[in-house]
Image (cartoon, helix red, strand yellow):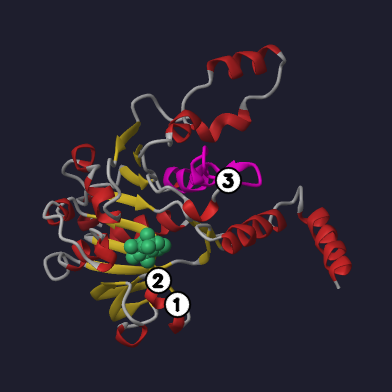
Amino acid sequence: MAQSSQRRPVRKAVFPVAGMGTRFLPATKAIPKEMLPIIDRPLIQYAVDEAREAGIEQLIFVTGRGKTAIVEHFDMAFELETTMAEREKSLAVLEPTRIQPGNLVAVRQQVPLGLGHAIWCARAIVGDEPFAIFLPDELMIANRGSTGCMKQMVEAYDEVGGNLISVLEVPREEVSSYGVIDPGAAQGALTEVRGLVEKPRREEAPSNLIISGRYILQPEVMRVLERQEKGAGGEIQLTDAMAQMIGTQPFHAVTFAGKRYDCGSKLGFVEATLALALARDDMAEDVRAMAARLLDQGS
Ligand code: G1P
């Protein structure tokens, strides 16, 4: 398709990871919440794996104080590797943490002014090209046989270009915790976005389709964020900036073929841990037996 070959590829991804993680205190007093492990990988690793599967080359972390462990995690640990090699241990387990030199950049969000502000902090590194955003709290696990969420979005982007967000349906009573779309025409997994509203009151929400933490945006959004306008909760909201782009550029939502776990909440975190353990061939049977035992004891 001549048209798709002209689209600028999505090579960069921004990961806003400056949040203080107060919901997980005291666990997150000295450790970034993104480093809390789901089984044997920190939460951030799942988002980075998803990005790399989608062909993203450059990772841009928007960090804050106390977040250096995230950058360390994706650095080469010379002493560890040398010791493991001397002991003839396989280094394959470290493969997901290897990022090409120069492909990891960390910028600071010095004051917590909102998600829109965090993304704006990455503007110099994003430059003049489309980019992806991952909110790592949202753990997106594809259905068996499907590609990851961002890869599904990149495929849709190759078709329609412009801006894309991943969406999913939630019960009406939950909409006020999220960004909500006003949906237009739908075709397959793609829905046109006619409007966006951040944390609407339930009775004012245009639908129950919420933004679920994955975005592909055009660089023009940075110019809107530059105005530093405050929205819901007194914060500079990414949703408000995106809403202003509707009508000037194509804007679509992609319904993800998979399951999303809200690892920003304790229950979601436990659910993700159990679900991933049950999906692993090396653990499923034992976890099932363990859960049955525990449920038995509890009754
Ligand atoms: C952010 C976004 C919101 C989105 C949500 C997904 O909200 O502003 O539009 O639906 O992430 O998790 P937050 O969770 O930071 O309040």
Name which residue lies at 47% across and 50% down.
21
Task: Answer above or below: position of 25 versus 67.
Answer: below
Name which residue lies at 45% across and 82% down.
173
Which one is nearer the viewer's eye here, 50 or 77? 77
Q: Secondary structure at mark 3?
A: loop
Q: Closer to the observer: label 1 or label 3? A: 3
Q: Amino acid at mark 3?
A: Ala
Q: Which residues are magenta?
A: 27-52
Tell me which corner region of the image, top left, top right, bottom left or bottom right, holds residue 102: top left
| Mark-to-mark CA distance, 1 and 3 | 26 Å
x, y percent for residue 72: 47, 28
Name which residue lies at 22% across and 48% down.
120
x, y percent for residue 12: 30, 42
Q: Which mark is residue 174?
A: 1
Q: Is residue 252 left or right of residue 243?
A: right
Q: Which residue is mark 3?
A: 27
x, y percent for residue 57: 36, 38
Which one is nearer the viewer's eye here, 189 or 293? 293
- Whether pointer 1 and pointer 2 mark residues with C-beta atoms closer than 8 Å, the reply is yes
Q: Earlier in the sequence, mark 1 or mark 3?
A: 3
Q: Amino acid at mark 2?
A: Ser
Which one is nearer the viewer's eye here, 195 or 299? 299
State which image quarter holds ligand 1.
Answer: bottom left
Q: Is residue 273 left or right of residue 228?
A: right
Q: Which residue is mark 2?
A: 177
Q: Residue furthest bottom?
A: 203
The quadrant the C terminus occupies is bottom right
Q: Secondary structure at mark 1?
A: helix
